[in-house]
Image (cartoon, grey):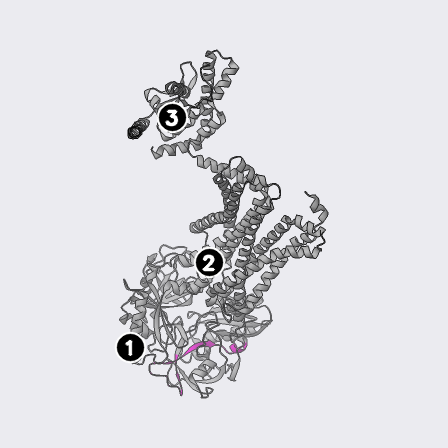
Amino acid sequence: MAWYHEVAASVAALVGRRRQDVDMDEEMRFHLDMETQRHRGEGLSEREARRLARREFGGVERHKDDTRDERGASTFFDALGDVRFALRSLRHRPGLTAAATITLAIGIGATSTVFGVVKHALLTPLPYANPEGVVGVWSAWKGFDRTWLSYDEWEGWKARVKAFADIGLYTDNAATIDGDSPERVRSTLMQANVFSILGVRLDRGRGFTAEEDQPGGPRATVLSYELWQRRFAGDPAILGKRIQISGIERTVVGITPAGFQMPLDYSAGERTDIYFPLATDAKNEGALPGPEFPKGGSNHGYYGVARLAPGATAAAANRQLRDIVAELEKFGYMANVGFHAFVIPMNEQIMGRVRPVLLVVFGAVMLVLLIACANVAGLLLVRGEARRRELAVRVALGAGTKRLARLLVTESALLAGIGGAMGLGLAWITVRLLRSNAPAGLPRLTETSIDWVVLLFALAISVVTALLTGVLPLANATQLALSGELREGGRGSTVGRARLRWRQALVAVEVALAVVLVAGAGLMIRTVRNLLNVDPGFRSDGVLTMRITTPQVFYPDSVRVVAFWDDLQRRVAALPGVKRVAAVRLLPLASEMGDWGLGIEGYTPPPGQGAPGDWQIVTPGYFETMGLTLREGRTFTAGDDMNGPLAMIVNRAFERQYFAGRHALGARVRIGGSDSTKKYHIVGIVDDVRHNALIGTVKPQFYVTLAQFAVAPGNTRRLMSLVVKTDGDPKRLVSAVRAQVRAIDPRLPVSEIRTMRDIVDAAIGGQRFAMETLGVFGLVALLLSAIGIFGIVSQVVASRLHELGIRAALGATPMDLMAMALGSGVRQAMVGLVIGILAALMLTRVLASLLHGVTPTDPLTFAAVVVVTGLVAVIASVAPAGRAARVDPNTVLRVD
Amino acid sequence: MPTESRLGPRAEVVRGTLEMLALKLLAETPMHGWGLSLKLREISRDVFDVNQGSLYPALQAMLRRGWIKAEWRMSENNRRARYYRITAEGRKQLDAEIMEWNRTSAAVNRVLRYAFSGA
């Protein structure tokens, strides 16, 4: 038998169904007519002949059905019938259908959204060739578990680490594209080999040459595809064009492919739009401390990226680095500080911090889906109760167990299908919301979209949902088919009890799952509270910030730059609502800060080590504006200008590290790269500011004024952030402050307008995101469990109405009856609570990496969970239990 | 009355056998359903209780498998009738079934012979 006949027959059956029916009717009519004629020929009357013919033919309709079944595609028509039937019976109970589909829609929608996020963030490869061969290279020493490379280290690793095919340095910054509408964009400074290490093939043109990547080399630039499209309208003749960036003319030599991002772009949440060679432009862009590529171990300021040699692994690279570092230590390089160097696979470097958050959220949403399934299964069970007689009749009429199963599975599949479709709609909306409100600091979230993989996933979980929700009612129905329900009569209290037990188990499971989610949410709430209570060392309330650059083309020297800031500060200070105003190089918690080698009087660093300090440049008034606490000495004043004696303020970590047991105040410090006659005096000591992160060690840090930084080491800092302390909502002042910038110089672009509050919030974005999602999921879980408990108590009351009536007649008080009913719900909740607490005690450990100041088994949180869940259980039970209390023995007993 | 009591003890014809017999008949000449049922009754001499209607699902099944083809033609008494004719694949199938049948009956015969001689 050839398969193509079957296929053709199926197609014919699907397409020509009506015509085939007509043919069949005529054929059978012909048969009966001919038989009748034959019997008449034997002498029977017309009526008798026809009757005999019919009898010998058998049931015409049955044969027609059988014939139809032989046409092919019969499974399809059966399923169609089942669907039609299921639709009818779902329409019959709109309340239940709505409850079930909405529950499933929430479950499937939430799960699909989270899957979309997780899939995009964790499963979509980075836009680099063979991204698994790209590693980030890092240095670390006492107190700093992941920090930048120095130039010496790069040189050493490049020559010695055999596991590297190549290693390059890069860093990020911002640049202004000059012109009629100046635009501030994110920039990357990179060594010539970085593009090839990442394995990116430029969309057009080329990357940087070795000649361009050296001090004084030709000024070349590469643009992002997006910038090229946006600002240059995809100009096909862009290569070779000269454009002015931050006051300097540069030749466009290449365009990156669309969608390309540098590793740092992911955590910055912004794409690099413009690329410069590192060596040529480092100083000009103010990105690096001191002269271009300062040698000496104490300047750590570059990000390292390497391509593993063919066949080499990250582990091999780490082994080789360990050996080389051990050797270096013997020569005294970075000795006695626990210096080491290591690589991290790039995917982990970018996503490592986010992965635990996303996995926790994904786990949480799966729990919500499970609860939704349990709830719908419970609803279908109740419905099974109501349909017992209908199903029993079907069994009596000869529907086999298989047929019954198909019917019920079709129903739950239909529910899951509708729920899945609605869920996808929901996911589409939430993804849109997520993209526009992506929490800061969570890379790749904004790239989330509903693609076919997410669609497939939604389909798959819908199928699983259909099975999960269908299997219990099915087991029940099968049992029913065997037990011969019809004989049981109206009340069926004994078989009903078995089903009740199933529902009770479901409710206990729901409560248990909800407890896990609520416990997780509770722990995250405490973590976020703890983080918010961490003293960052500054006061964030009421502070408005914005970035402003003073390009060389308009402000050729430091005198003019300082004058601009003086002028701007004076004007902004005069605005109503402004209390203080200042400017700063890097806003705390908004970016990480590198260090600069120092010569500190009276401090001799161990051999091979420098005395690095994180360098901060401010204008006078900064400490007051940001609310830093002065410990000793004084803050900066207007007198700390270009002509005044060089004044430096250091943090307490600086004092502790370099002045143990000595007096820091008045000590002299030379900033690496400046001439030996220009030394700063320490004039003040301030409390530590948590600049790089809310938690972790604070490094030694020093502050100098913008004006004096231009004297020693003699660099002009062009990129600064304005900070404005206001007495109300800082956002109100945005346009007024911008107007002042425009009034001085309309050519200057203003970017990154944020409040310090936003910045602090972004710093705990991961934890906050986990808290919010776990919180929402926990609430949904509690709500669903409450519905479950409500249902179970209602059912208990309904099924025991008779018994309650008798008890009432025998003198039980309403309180007694209510207590009985309440007990039935609360008991399930208690079972669920106990199981849930045990599960949560084990599961919350996965949160450990996200928690701060609270253990995964925090007793206070768990106590709160018990109270909350218990309360929800009682509240959900009260209404139906109230019905038990109002039982009137007369009405109840008269029902029979 | 040409037929005897409907309660007589007769074997219900097996679907496979019915198909084989129908194919065999159609191999000789194309026929319509009624003609086929007449012929079947005649051949089997009422040994098999051919419920006439059950012929049609069997024909439909053979159509689906491509063993026979159907077409509307005028019958001998000038009425439109649906004629079935065997296809090449149907003939192959028939040969296979006859061979199978012969094998089975030979085997059964052997068993019976052995059973009786051994007794």
Q: Chain of mark 2?
A: A
Mark whose residue sits in front, 1 or 2: 1
x then y, percent, for residue A153: 32, 74
Q: Secondary structure at mark 2?
A: helix
> Relative to residue A877, is residue A852 drawn left or right?
left
Q: Residues within 10 Å of mark 1 (few under 14, many from 20)?
A: few
Q: Is residue A834 among what the camera can see?
A: yes
According to the picture, the residue beneath numbered tag 3 turns out to be B18
x then y, percent, for residue A626: 53, 75
> Relative to residue A334, is residue A635 drawn left or right?
right
Q: Is residue A672 above or below residue A489?
A: below
Q: Amino acid at mark 2?
A: Thr
Of the 4 image quadrants, the one containing the C terminus of chain A is top right
Q: Is residue A611 above or below residue B40?
A: below
- In the picture, the disc for residue A327 is 1
Q: Which residues are magenta?
A: A597-624
Q: Secondary structure at mark 3?
A: helix
According to the picture, the residue beneath numbered tag 2 turns out to be A446
